[in-house]
């Protein structure tokens, strides 16, 4: 506790680890330090005198032990007083940027009070939640691409995957670390994360061509080489704004894009390629 004597940084400044943020003025701490030094000097003289008298046979071993105990206690009090004085200087616990500073010269602050905030975003940690069905496909060290809502794109690595799910959401916490040497990417903004977990061949189709068969299976209708309708069961692997990526189809297909709601599997048709006219 004490009055703020000096503030060495301003809001927005970058500081290194150990840099002085502010200095407090505390007369009590200075007086305690001076007293502790005097007490240590006196205890040291008493110990030296007791040891000298013991050598002459005048003092007892107990007297020397008492003097040595007093000397050790005086050393401890001096160390505590020096620590109290050093606490008058507020230093940065790590390198970062001063994001909040709530003290001014002359202001009185209590011990333990929060006086500011330093943010370290080099590197930047991107936190996200993993659905339980995707947990086994994620592991530390995987490459990740992060697209921030502000327009920046950065490459990073998965550095943490949690092992306990949140009770409310049944998702697992995970983190990606990306380089941010100049601090250009701010903390706390939204981002889209993509982590390759494997390769699969997929087709990009419009949602309008996807339908259900009588058994409730999701699929699309195609035309075989014999010009008959074939229902192909599919699985959606990724959704985008203008379409979805699906698996389960052969490498090349003739996809029915118009009229698929009016034909059934096995029915013969007379296909017409899109753009071929009537």
Image (cartoon, rainbow, N blue to C red):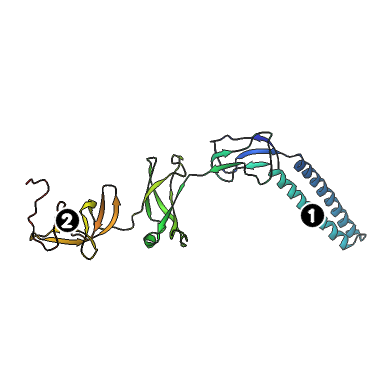
Relative to 144, is 109 on the left or the right?
Answer: right
**Alpha carbons under labels 2 and 1: distance apart:** 92 Å
Residue at figure coordinates x 29%, y 57% from the top left: 237
Viewer-nearest residue: 52 or 244: 244
Residue under label 1, please give it.
73
**Mark 2 secondary-structure assignment:** helix
Viewer-nearest residue: 237 or 48: 237
User: Where residue 226 sits in the image (x, y, percent)?
Assistant: 7, 61
Question: Quick one: quadrant of the N terminus?
Answer: top right
User: Where residue 133 sits in the image (x, y, percent)?
Assistant: 37, 62
Numbered label attached to residue 256: none
Mark 1: few/some/many CA within 10 Å (<14, 14-19, 20+): some
Query: Does residue 214 lie above or below 48 as drawn?
Result: below
Relative to 110, is 94 on the left or the right?
Answer: left
User: Where residue 34 sits in the image (x, y, percent)?
Assistant: 79, 43
Relative to 270, is 32 on the left or the right?
Answer: right
Numbered label attached to residue 261: 2
First along the sequence among labels 2 and 1: 1
Relative to 233, is 171 on the left or the right?
Answer: right
Residue at the far bottom: name it.
215
Residue at figure coordinates x 90%, y 62% from the top left: 60
User: Where residue 115 sits in the image (x, y, percent)?
Assistant: 62, 41
Q: Is residue 240 visible?
A: yes
Query: Does residue 11 lie above or below 275 as drawn?
Result: above
Residue at figure coordinates x 8%, y 57% from the top left: 269
Residue at figure coordinates x 29%, y 52% from the top left: 239
Q: Is residue 255 visible?
A: no
């Amino acid at each position: 506790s004490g009055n703020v004597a000096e503030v060495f940084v301003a809001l927005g400044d970058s500081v290194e680890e150990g840099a002085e943020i502010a200095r407090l003025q505390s007369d009590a701490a200075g007086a305690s330090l001076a007293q502790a030094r005097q007490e240590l000097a006196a205890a040291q003289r008493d110990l030296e005198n007791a040891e000298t008298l013991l050598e002459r046979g005048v003092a007892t071993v107990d007297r020397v032990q008492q003097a040595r105990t007093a000397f050790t206690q005086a050393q401890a009090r001096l160390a505590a007083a020096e620590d109290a004085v050093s606490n008058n200087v507020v230093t940065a616990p790590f390198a970062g940027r001063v994001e909040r500073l709530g003290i001014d010269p002359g202001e009185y602050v209590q011990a333990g009070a929060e006086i500011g905030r330093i943010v370290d975003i080099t590197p930047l940690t991107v936190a996200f939640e993993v659905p339980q069905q995707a947990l086994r496909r994620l592991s530390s060290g995987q490459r990740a691409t992060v697209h921030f809502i502000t327009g920046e794109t950065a490459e990073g690595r998965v550095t943490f995957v949690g092992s306990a799910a949140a009770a409310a959401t049944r998702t697992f916490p995970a983190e990606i670390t990306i380089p941010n040497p100049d601090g250009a990417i701010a903390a706390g903004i939204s981002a889209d994360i993509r982590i390759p977990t494997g390769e699969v061949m997929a087709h990009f189709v419009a949602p309008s061509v996807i339908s259900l068969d009588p058994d409730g299976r999701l699929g699309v209708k195609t035309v075989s080489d014999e010009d008959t309708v074939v229902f192909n069961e599919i699985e959606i692997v990724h959704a985008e704004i203008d379409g979805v990526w699906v698996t389960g189809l052969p490498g090349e297909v003739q996809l029915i894009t118009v009229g698929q709601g009016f034909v059934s599997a096995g029915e013969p048709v007379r296909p017409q390629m899109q753009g071929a006219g009537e």
